[in-house]
Amino acid sequence: MQLTEDYKWIDFFDFYWRLGIDGLSIGPILLTGFITTLATLAAWPVTRDSRLFHFLMLAMYSGQIGLFSSRDLLLFFIMWELELIPVYLLISVWGGKKRLYSATKFILYTAGSSVFLLLGVLGIGLYASNEPTLNFETSANQSYPVALEIIFYIGFLIAFAVKSPIIPFHTWLPDTHGEAHYSTCMLLAGILLKMGAYGLVRINMEFLPRAHSIFAPWLMIVGTIQIIYAASASPGQRNLKKRIAYSSVSHMGFIIIGIGSLSDMGLNGAFLQIISHGFIGAALFFLAGTSYDRICLVYLDEMGGMAVLVPKIFTTFSILSMASLALPGMSGFVAELIVFFGIITSQNFFLIQKILITFVMAIGTILTPIYSLSMLRQMFYGYKFFNAPNSYFFDSGPRELFISISIFLPVIGIGLYPDFVFSLSVDKVETLISNFFYK
């Protein structure tokens, strides 16, 4: 633990303000800072109440940083809740046509799920002591009866499953992404979804190892179903942003499988996928938003032939779609490959289970190019806009090119040299996994 802060906050409740960064949280924190900076740059076109817009973006940012660095359960919960209000306002004020519907759906899902988080936090804090013990260190060393541990685990799992959408709790995501302004979408896809995965590792794996080893096979099964389901649902979406949203649900499946694999490699791969998808998802939403700014069309079947008119957008969109479908040399490929290796080397599963899961995951990686490339084909190829009169669009300006390139560079960098990310998380992951084999 580094950069720690530890202050008494509320005397009466023995409640501390504890922050600190370790190998698990440094990656998401850096990702958050990076994506938020680029998202505020992407929000230049927002003219309506722009000060409030940027204030809410920064409020959301502080909630995310607080969540990733908190070392106290109640503080974790407070930061988790602090996230909701800015997102709700960002969607309901600056969203699309159905913005109130999707914002309400978002707040119902996430606030409803955080009730379970609060119950779990209070249960862990108040168990076996008169004084509430909320700091992470004592909770991690505490041991619970297995039945109680499973109950806690289910509570936390529901809360995190809604946030990093695990099927069947994912239905708020396509609506929210379809309606939100694209700079908000960058934050949602890049960071908000990663909070759930981070919580799974940070709380469910660290505090409740026995329950996690019971649930791990089920997590892997759900992850494989999620990869296939979302990749099959994605080509059916007419709305461009919804299609990208389903692709990010599909990519979150790899993270869940990596968390469930209970092996060093699988967890490292999940961590790398968290970082990599944070970049790629944010970039895709940004490019979808910029092309919407040009043509003001949402539905893919109305688009076509944009490649000749906006060559720079076409190039960046193509490259980042390739990154999304795990092209070798990009970060997505390394992450998914290492999750595959993590399943194969895991000692917790029988051979037939491993073969089945890897086979189904491989089908998922075949389905990914189908929706990515058909999205590119519908948007950029063909003759639709080419024949249209007054079909003159501005191509990407320097601001948009800067955003695209600065997201693209880390994607290539991690793809060519993944040790950038592994060197951060590898020691912490080893101690986490050793819990499962030596406890």
Image: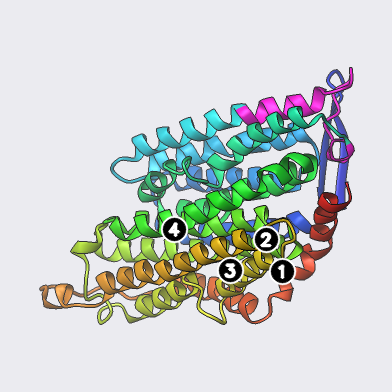
Please name the amino acid that badge 2 sits on.
Phe
- Identify the residue under disc 3: 336
Q: Which residue is mark 4?
A: 228
Sequence-first disc among 4 and 3: 4
Using the rendered view, name the quadrant where residue 278 is placed.
Answer: bottom right
Give the foreground label among 3 and 2: 3
Q: Is residue 402 above or below residue 69?
A: below
Categorize mark 4 by other alpha carbons within 10 Å: few (<14), some (14-19), many (20+): many
Residue 211 colored in magenta in the image: no
Tell me which numbered mark, 3 or 1, is placed earlier along the sequence: 3
Q: Which residues are magenta?
A: 116-141
Local packing at callout 3 (Cα closer than 10 Å; few below 14, some 14-19, many 20+) is many
Instruction: Kindly identify which residue carries mark 1.
Output: 421
Compute the Cα span from label 4 to label 1.
27 Å
**Residue 25 makes an appearance in the image:** yes
Label 2 sits on residue? 271
Residue occupying image coordinates x 72% and y 37%? 76
306 or 261: nearer the viewer: 261
**Disc number placed over residue 178 in the picture, else none:** none
The 10 Å Cα crowd at callout 2, few under 14, some 14 to 19, many 20 or more, is many
Q: Main secondary structure of the magenta part?
A: helix
Q: Are marks 2 and 1 in contact (CB under 8 Å)?
A: yes
Q: CA distance from mark 3 to mark 1?
A: 14 Å
Give the CA distance from mark 4 to mark 3: 14 Å
What kind of residue is marked 4? Ile
| Picture layout, residue 19 above or below residue 282 | above
Q: In the image, which is nearer the foreground, mark 4 or mark 3?
A: 4
